[in-house]
């Protein structure tokens, strides 16, 4: 499973990109608003930091307007993938997007049927929101399992991006459920990298080594 960073904060992008673990980035309007960042400002730097796909979301709600907006977003960089909400208009927009040579990530997916529709319409990526399902008493990993089973059964090439992740455990669950990609917030990357036994192990090696040198 590949790892993307789910963020619009360039400091976070720079830090996690330096770990050599990133295959791409996803953003959304809420994340950009949270850090007071423009899409243009974000892309100007992020494109240098990460070489993989960068998902940018359209705000238009009608299919034709989505396609027009997507064409403008694509001018910001070759890596741009267009994030399109899972609506009837979003599905209608797929044809125009692909005719314009754009790749799409169909987002805000909460059911296997939505994922079937997203794939049938030609979405390159589909983003089921695990965390928001878990928040509401459902089980996000089960949705990933269902989508994976359906896509595998019918040879569907649309890539599954496990999104809206809240915990480090959800990253493991996404991998076990067969997600192609997990888009992980910065705070969860920080939880993934550490383990108390790793810290303790380093401390003991340092102490033993220092003791040996002073003999
Ligand atoms: O990429 C989608 C994701 O960022 C949504 O996350 O935390 O708003 O549910 P969240």
Image (tube, grey):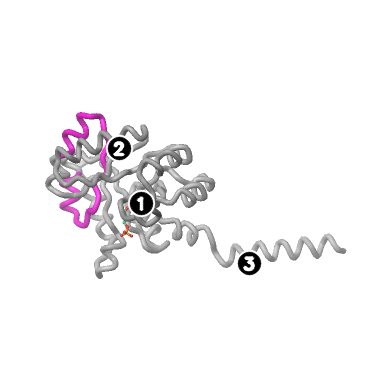
Ligand 1 - quadrant of the structure image: bottom left
Residue 51: mark: none
- Is 98 positioned to the left or the right of 77 in the image? left
Q: Nearest to the eye among marks 1 and 3: give it.
A: 1
Closest to the observer, 181 or 85: 85
Disc 1: CA contacts within 10 A as few (<14), some (14-19) or many (>=20) = some
- Is 7 positioned to the left or the right of 82 in the image? right
Instruction: Read off the residue under disc 1.
Output: 32
Residue 73: mark: 2
The question of residue 102 being in magenta is answered with yes
Residue 61, percent from left and from top: 16, 47
Q: CA distance from mark 1 to mark 3?
A: 38 Å
Mark 2 near ligand 1 (CB under 8 Å)?
no
* Range shown magenta: 93-118
Residue at 72% of width from left, 62% of height from top?
Answer: 206
Residue 50, percent from left and from top: 45, 40
């Amino acid at each position: 499973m590949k790892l993307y960073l789910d963020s619009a904060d360039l400091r976070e992008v720079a830090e996690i990109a330096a770990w050599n673990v990133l295959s791409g980035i996803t953003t959304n309007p809420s994340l950009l608003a949270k850090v007071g960042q423009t899409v243009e400002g974000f892309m100007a730097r992020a494109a240098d930091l990460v070489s993989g796909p960068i998902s940018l979301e359209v705000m238009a709600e009608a299919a034709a307007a989505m396609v027009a907006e997507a064409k403008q977003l694509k001018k910001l960089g070759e890596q741009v993938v267009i994030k399109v909400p899972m609506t009837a208009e979003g599905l209608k927009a797929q044809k125009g997007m692909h005719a314009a040579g754009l790749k799409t990530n169909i987002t805000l997916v909460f059911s296997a049927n939505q994922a079937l529709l997203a794939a049938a319409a030609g979405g390159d990526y589909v983003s089921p929101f695990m965390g928001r399902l878990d928040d509401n008493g459902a089980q996000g990993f089960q949705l990933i399992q269902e989508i994976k089973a359906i896509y595998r059964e019918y040879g569907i090439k649309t890539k599954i991006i496990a999104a809206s992740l809240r915990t480090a455990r959800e990253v493991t669950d996404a991998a076990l459920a067969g997600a192609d990609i997990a888009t992980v917030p910065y705070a969860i990357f920080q939880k993934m990298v550490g383990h108390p036994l790793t810290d303790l192990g380093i401390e003991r090696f340092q102490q033993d080594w220092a003791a040996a040198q002073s003999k």
